[in-house]
């Protein structure tokens, strides 16, 4: 990480405003230490720094961290500062992590959208579900994520309360490059928004809900073995959306006018949307899976290619699994929304840096083993890439030194008793 660039980001965003010791870069290093060391509280973080004071010079921190200082920083320093650091590192290392050499049946550049909910011990952010009969209801924070499938790293991450539905954040899809191919699950079903995506030049594939109502327009032949149906269907939507009120409507609006803020009004929208429905047998042949896409031309993408594109959506599920299994996303170093978002952003930064080390070393170790090696050697000033390439390198060097020492001792004994 380039310290000067991080300090520049902190100056532009005001992250170092009214800061005596714990500036933006030092705050990032402390949080990275806590995340990689799997520490669960502010006290453990400060005690860990105190115990390793003589081995922390290479981290660039020349003062001891206090609990109150770290707690205030997690509460006051905006989490968007750490988000900007993640995006800066993503732009720098995306070419290193691009999986361009991997052979795919579908060569389309694919983006995957999904969300994951992280449970909280208290209802800081509203979670989903009913109130329990015994005890208090737990809160939850939902991370709405878009990844580039061949890089396996989030492009966009938005944090909301756990109770927010997935399709309410689908507007972020319009920030992707023009002509992108997107895949998402059935939680993002919104026919009116699908139509807007189609008109904007985006391609998508999604699972079709079991209770979806549609009209079959065209039935096509299915040359593929496992494809049962390839159809053109039509959906009908009828929904209310909120839009900003116009100045002309505001003049004729009854009641008191608001002094500030955006005034919205609900508007009813009705229409139809045509897309393509594909029904495929599962791999075991015991069930069927239904897909829907706006790629209507079979010559552009066959039915089997559409199914394979949706199969690649599983990359984001593997990403969520690695993050939750290897990093402490159950214990947070703060009881406010800003501190929770900071820790999640720092976790994403730690994951990105370790993926870069894994790519540079070309190591075949599992990601969990890489996290373990980093955690075990966090206080040592070593080359992590060399360690990942050969974890037993130092042990082999010690064995060679020991063998040379034993050989020298034998030579001395022979010299004392000549034949």
Image: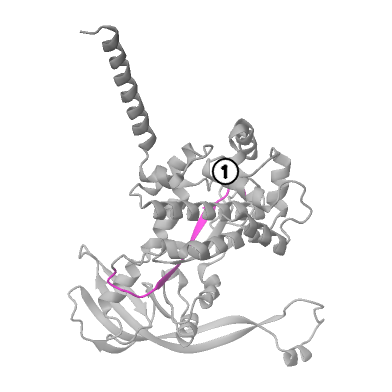
156 horizontally vs 366: left or right: right
The residue at 37%/39% (across/down) is 391
The residue at 51%/68% (across/down) is 166
The residue at 37%/64% (across/down) is 99
* Region in magenta: 104-122
Q: Identify the element where label 1 is drawn.
A: helix
Please state, as top left, top right, bottom left or bottom right, where the C terminus lies in the image: top left
- Report x, y in % for residue 185: 41, 69
Q: Is residue 352 above or below residue 383?
A: below
- Report x, y in % for residue 298: 28, 85
Q: Which residue is mark 1?
A: 33
Q: Is residue 287 magenta?
A: no
Visible residue check, residue 152: no
Question: Is residue 361 or residue 329 the one in the foreground?
Answer: 361
9 horizontally vs 280: left or right: right
Question: Is residue 134 or residue 238 the one in the foreground?
Answer: 238
- Report x, y in % for residue 105: 27, 71
254 horizontally vs 387: left or right: right
Mark 1 surroundings: few (<14), some (14-19) or many (≥20) residues within 10 A: many
209 horizontally vs 29: left or right: left
Q: Is residue 111 magenta?
A: yes
The image quadrant that residue 2 belongs to is bottom right
Q: Is residue 51 above or below residue 190?
A: above
- Report x, y in % for residue 58: 59, 42
The image quadrant that residue 223 belongs to is bottom left
Question: Is residue 390 or residue 148 the one in the foreground?
Answer: 390
């Amino acid at each position: 990480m380039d310290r000067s660039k991080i300090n520049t980001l902190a100056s532009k965003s005001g992250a170092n405003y009214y800061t005596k010791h714990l500036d933006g870069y030092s705050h990032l290093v402390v949080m990275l230490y806590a995340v990689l060391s799997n520490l669960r509280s502010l006290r453990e973080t400060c005690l860990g720094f105190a115990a390793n004071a003589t081995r922390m010079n290479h981290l660039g921190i020349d003062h001891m961290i206090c609990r109150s200082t770290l707690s205030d920083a997690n509460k006051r320093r905006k989490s968007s500062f750490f988000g900007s650091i993640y995006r800066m590192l993503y732009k720098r290392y995306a070419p290193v992590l691009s999986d361009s050499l991997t052979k795919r049946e579908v060569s389309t550049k694919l983006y995957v959208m999904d969300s994951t909910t992280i449970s909280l011990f208290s209802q800081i952010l509203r979670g989903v579900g009913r109130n329990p009969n015994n005890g208090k209801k737990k809160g939850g924070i939902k991370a709405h994520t878009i990844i580039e499938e061949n890089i396996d790293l989030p492009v966009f991450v938005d944090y909301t309360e756990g109770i927010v539905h997935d399709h309410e954040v689908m507007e972020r899809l319009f920030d992707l490059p023009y002509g992108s191919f997107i895949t998402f699950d059935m939680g993002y079903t919104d026919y009116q928004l699908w139509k807007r995506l189609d008109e904007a030049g985006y391609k998508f594939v999604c699972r079709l809900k079991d209770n979806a109502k549609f009209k079959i327009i065209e039935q096509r032949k299915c040359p593929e073995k496992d494809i049962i149906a390839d159809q053109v269907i039509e959906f009908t939507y009828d929904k209310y959306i909120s839009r900003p009120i116009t100045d002309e409507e505001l003049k004729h609006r009854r009641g008191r006018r608001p002094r500030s803020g955006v005034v919205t009004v609900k508007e009813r929208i009705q229409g139809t949307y045509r897309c393509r429905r594909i029904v495929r047998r599962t791999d075991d042949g015991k069930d069927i899976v239904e897909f829907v896409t706006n790629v209507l031309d079979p010559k552009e993408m066959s039915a089997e290619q559409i199914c394979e594109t949706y199969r690649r959506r599983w990359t984001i599920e593997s990403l969520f699994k690695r993050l939750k299994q290897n990093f402490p996303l159950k214990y947070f170093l703060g009881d406010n929304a800003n501190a929770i978002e900071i820790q999640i952003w720092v976790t994403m930064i730690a994951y990105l840096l370790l993926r870069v080390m894994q790519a540079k070393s070309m190591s075949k170790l599992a990601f969990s083993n890489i996290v373990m090696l980093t955690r075990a050697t966090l206080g040592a000033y070593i080359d992590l890439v060399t360690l990942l390439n050969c974890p037993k390198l130092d042990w082999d060097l010690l064995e060679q030194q020991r063998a040379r020492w034993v050989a020298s001792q034998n030579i001395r004994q022979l010299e004392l008793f000549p034949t």
